[in-house]
Amino acid sequence: MPMFKSFRVIITLRILFIIALVLALVYCFSYTEYYITMFILVVVIVLTVGDMIHKVNQSNRDFTAFLLGIKYEDFSATYSGHHKGKTFGEMYDAFNQINRKFLNIKAEKEANHQYLQTIVEHVSVGLLCLDEEGNVFMMNKALKKLLRKPYLVNAEALKKIDKNLYEVVQRLHSGDKELLKITIDNKIVQLSISALEFKLQKQSLKLVSMQNIQSELEERELEAWQKLIRILRHEIMNSISPIVSLTSTIEGMMKGGKLEGEDLDDVKAAIRAIRNRSEGLMHFTETYRNLTRIPPPKFQIVDVRLLVQRLSTLLKPAFEKDHINFQMQMPNSPVNCSIDPELLEQVLINLIKNAIEAVNGSEKPTITVTAQKEQSGKTTISVIDNGKGIEEGELDEIFVPFYTTKVEGTGIGLSLSRQIVRMHKGRLFVQSVVGEGTVFTIVI
């Protein structure tokens, strides 16, 4: 750089000047008796050396101060060296330019921090960030309002709010999500809690989000109860109405006294009808009870590919009977997943049987089952058919208990399947296009 080149030239010239003075001193000392001249030369040499040392030290001190300012992020200092010459003026101008550049970067960094801080404080979802030791790195206003706490020092403080909340926060890993019901200030709060693990400047952090979904759940629960009550009322009324009517008919016949001939046959037929309808009502009630009696999953690591292959063998006669092209699209590597194989097998049987009925009448009936491991660690299983599809208005209803469009259907297959998948902390959802086909997807 020019300024360092000039500085080197100045130092070189000063050294040469000092050498010349020393040579002159040696000459005077050896060949003359000019003592006054020798004294003057000694003084000049000492002053010149001292001035050079001072200039070098001053430059070192300024340079050291500049580097320390960078180390401690203090860019407020300004440097002026034009009075010391062009060389130092250029060097100090460069220091000032670098300081201004760092000041601009720091200002932009602070502006971005304020921008992100504003967003974090503005969102309605409670956010809690913890380091590896469980110390609170950050918590926003929404979380303070939700937990009724002005601050949290570490994760241990969550125990004072609810022990289960602390355990869930500690247990969750990146991508995990759980629902938790707790009581805060004597009010029930239903929390949806999820976590994200990341690194910031080599420091491992966990970001936990908490959202109160109590009101949304109450609305959904009310809607589900209304649908269920509507279906139950429909089924029960369909059974009770003919029973009441037949009972009234029998009562009228009995008023006449002894029954003979056709009247007796009518009474027997009415009693049989009442019995059949009562048995149907009992069957309906037993079916409803089955929805609430699913055994808890017995988790084990299972290769989903082997599970689908077993089902392919089990349902092969049905495929051959209806001339269905059954395909499996699986990766070469294992698709291991922690599941209850018997329960998930029941879910897949329900979905595949629905697909068999859906492709009935298709020109080239095809059912495809796919399975793959996502980057998030989740396992995705899809049952795809090219059947007639599901009307848009029915997509929201097909998972409601006892809702069915089949003549002989019970209406609990999909509801039961979704309940089993939820017991695996997974999701079951459907996509369908009328005339093209349907895709049921399980994510566990």
Image (spheres, rainbow, N blue to C red):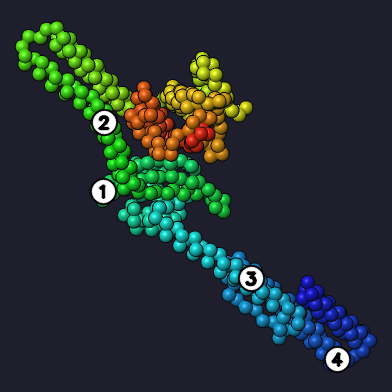
Q: Residue at x 38, y 26 (%)?
A: 406
Lateral position of residue 201 relative to residue 428, left or right: right
Q: Quadrant of residue 328?
A: top right
Q: How many marks?
A: 4
Q: Which residue is mark 4?
A: 37
**Image quarter (top left, top right, bottom left or bottom right) of the N terminus:** bottom right
Q: Earlier in the sequence, mark 2 or mark 3?
A: 3
Q: Is residue 265 above or below residue 11?
A: above
- Mark 3 and mark 1 in contact (Cβ < 8 Å)? no
- Going by the numbered disc 3, the residue's amino acid type is Lys
Lateral position of residue 107 relative to residue 190, left or right: right
Q: Position of residue 260 (x, y in %)?
A: 11, 7
- Going by the numbered disc 2, the residue's amino acid type is His
- Going by the numbered disc 1, the residue's amino acid type is Lys
Task: Between residue 400 and residue 200, name the one nearer to us.
Answer: 400
Q: Which residue is mark 1?
A: 187
Q: Is residue 214 visible?
A: no
